Amino acid sequence: METVSTARAFGGTQGVYRHRSSATGTNMTFSVFVPDHAPGARLPVVWYLSGLTCTHANVTEKGEYRRACAEHGLIFVAPDTSPRGESVPDDPAGAYDFGLGAGFYVDATEAPFDRHYRMWSYVTEELPALIGEAFPADMGRQSIMGHSMGGHGALTIGLRHPERFSAVSAFAPIVAPGRVPWGEKALTGYLGQDRAKWRRHDAVALIEDGARVPELLVDQGEADNFLREQLRPEWLAAACSAAGIDLTLRMQPGYDHSYYFISTFMADHLAWHAARLQ
């Protein structure tokens, strides 16, 4: 693992790191904030998954999470959203919603994407092993959150690994990718035409098929341009109601899809996670 940069912030260390991933076959960059702590202490870990077009840098630079993480003693990990490099295939038309920056947190099975686009394995297996080895992380206390495409990733990973994550939350998540344009394009391109295979990467479908967590926290801006076509939080609300999952869905008047929205409610989410990780 190579250290790209470190900086002091809020009584902790913000680092950016790079390593060679066996899952993706590429170099991968991620950021980690570690609050100051007693020697030998192990701190709980919050995973943050970013959305379309993003790298680790978007939340690292604009997410405004460090003060809350220092206050609650939380390690904050932000991976990239896709493999990158000259050999990595992209959307043939150069669109923003597929390919580079749009890995959708799945392991692709369709050529040519199956060679490198293995973000599910990277985020759920390889990077956690590295974090547990290289940082003072208590891997018995983990939670996960994300935004948009990353909200989709956080919900699906949390629902499929309820024993691992003490809390799951999201900002403006894609709750049912199998039923909206962003998800239909991505899941077809990465997983093929068999929609039955998509259900393991669709939060609403997972809940319908029996996946359970005790509770979820979701914030959604009412002025989000993608609300009606791509996000559809009411579908998640209906699925959680039918399944007995305690969903706190907060519709926020005037807020859009940007990091102005995310940063406004980031401290709320981290306090909610901290209460469930301690």
Image (cartoon, helix red, strand yellow):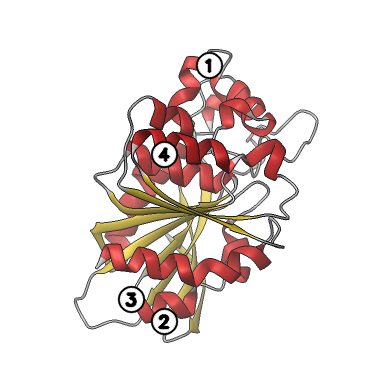
Sequence-first disc among 1 and 3 = 3
The kind of residue on which mark 1 rests is Arg
Q: Are marks 4 and 2 in contact (CB under 8 Å)?
A: no
Residue 73: which numbered mark, if any? Answer: 3
Element under label 1? helix
The spot of residue 142 in percent (x, y) is 30, 57
Compare marks 4 and 1 and give the one earlier in the sequence: 1
Q: Amino acid at mark 3?
A: Gly
Along the polypeptide, which appears first: circle 3 or circle 4? 3
Residue placed farthest to the left in the image? 40
The answer to whether the residue labelled 1 contacts the one labelled 3, judged by CB atoms less than 8 Å apart, is no
Residue 241: image quadrant is top left
Give the labeled residue for mark 2. 12
Question: Dot 4: within a 10 Å radius of its alpha carbon, few (fewer than 14), some, or many (20 or more) residues?
Answer: many
Q: Disc 2 or 1, which lies upstream in sequence? A: 2
Q: CA distance from mark 4 to mark 1?
A: 22 Å
Q: Which residue in the protein does label 4 denote?
A: 240
Judge from the rendering whether residue 174 lies leftward or rightward of residue 181; answer left or right: left
| Mark-to-mark CA distance, 4 and 2 | 37 Å
Say what secondary structure mark 2 lies in. Answer: strand
* SS under mark 3: loop
Q: Residues within 10 Å of mark 3 (few under 14, many from 20)?
A: many
Residue at (46, 27) in percent of width and height: 205
Mark closer to the observer (4, 1): 4
Judging by the rendered image, the residue that carries numbered circle 1 is 195
Between marks 2 and 1, how big is the CA–CA gap? 45 Å
The tally of labels here is: 4
